[in-house]
Image: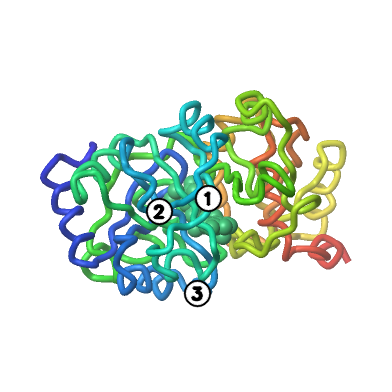
Amino acid sequence: MMPDSGAIAQAARFLEEGKLVAIPTETVYGLAADADNPAAVAAIFTTKGRPANHPLIVHVARDADLSHWAVDIPSEAHQLIAAFWPGSLTLILKRAPKVSDAVTGGQDSIGLRCPSHPVAQALLKTFRDGQGGVAAPSANRFGRVSPTTAQHVVDEFGAPGAGPIAAVLDGGACAVGIESTIVDLTRLDTYGPVLLRPGQVSVQELEQVLGRSLAMAAHDAPRVSGSLDAHYAPQTPLVLVETDNFVKTLAELQAKQRQVASLRVSTNPQAYAHDLYAQLRSLDQLGADVILVEQPPGSTAWQGINDRLRRAAFDSLGVLERLLA
Ligand code: TXA
Ligand code: MG
């Protein structure tokens, strides 16, 4: 199942040659390039169709020297790294001067993450003997649902070799299933630590390690970043419906002869996150008029999921009214 050391060594060589490689991480699959090669990083943007001012996360091996990427690393970063790396937490730090603008989108900061997936770990350890950095956004076209299997990546970009991607390392289905939690530590003096994107590493866990509360990006600490309101969206309009209205809404749509794909909530947020993007992809393929999603609970365990669903539903305002008219 897992790629062998030969496939991983070949992928590391592709990266050194400036090619793109799709890699499994525990969150979602990434579209990876050598972060020290601006031309390779530029190819990520053209392949994804992503605006050039959206910064990328740089993935590093366990013992990588972070001073290659960041300066003035605060003690809060070391606390969070000790608690959550390798894992699904990205830290935004002040960038080192030599980091390419292609990676940072011209910002004065850099996103760093050490993923725990064994294949990602093995690749990062092999690439430049563990001292390189791999820039990788999620391996999907801009604005679309992130891939959580190797097949999803092939569905997005075509088979490796034929399309823009030299290799796709198949590491199985991603364990977490939604993108990493992002914490901004560049504005500690004014805002303290700021949550830019919720994920499986929860606000509670972060606050416990830091011994202080997090500011929320949208409210207390605005920042221009890639957190667009509309994102992670299937092609079919997606509408969130409260549990109390779910059955009634479904019946009303069916009475109007509408084709409805639906996703009910489950009891386990980890299992739900694990399956979410695969579910959205297969529901999308039904070609229904709408994907009706039952609104999950508001508790912290569901925060990352609710964030992605809210963005996926963003462009669908008014769809229900139109389908029921
Ligand atoms: O789980 C993940 O984080 C996955 C896997 C592949 O590691 N990656 C991922 O990358 O989700 P991407 O590019 O799809 O989303 C990264 C988000 C974007 O919204 C980007 O704007 C934000 O992180 N970001 C990256 N660097 C940043 C920075 N320096 N300042 C603010 N936001 C940043
Ligand atoms: Mg993405």
**Residue that numbered label 3 is attached to:** 52
Side (left or right) of 166 relative to 89: left
Q: Which amino acid does label 1 sit on?
A: Leu
- Label 1 crowding class (10 Å Cα cut-off): few <14, some 14-19, many 20+? many
Disc 1 vs disc 3: which is toward the camera?
Answer: 1
Q: Which residue is drawn at 57% across and 33% down?
A: 201
Q: Which residue is more in the foreground, 49 or 220?
A: 220
Kindly indicate the quadrant of the structure image that contains residue 215. Answer: top right
x and y percentages locating residue 210 in the rendered image: 63, 29
SS label for mark 1: strand
Can residue 145 be seen here? The reply is: no
Is 3 placed above or below 105 here?
A: above
Q: What residue type is labelled 3?
A: Ala
Q: Residue at x 31, y 42 (%)?
A: 64
**Residue that numbered label 2 is attached to:** 69
Side (left or right) of 170 relative to 272: left
SS label for mark 2: loop
Q: Estimate the spatial distance between the alpha carbons at disc 2 and disc 1, rounded to whole Å.
A: 9 Å
Q: Is the residue marked 3 within 8 Å of ligand 1, measured from its CB?
A: no
Q: Is disc 2 in contact with disc 1, using a CB cutoff of under 8 Å?
A: yes
x and y percentages locating residue 56 in the rendered image: 47, 60
Quadrant location of the C terminus? bottom right
Can residue 269 be seen here? The reply is: yes
Quadrant location of the N terminus? top left
Residue situated furthest left in the rendering: 6
x and y percentages locating residue 28 in the rendered image: 45, 46
SS label for mark 3: loop
x and y percentages locating residue 2 in the rendered image: 23, 37
Q: Estimate the spatial distance between the alpha carbons at disc 3 and disc 2, rounded to whole Å.
A: 19 Å
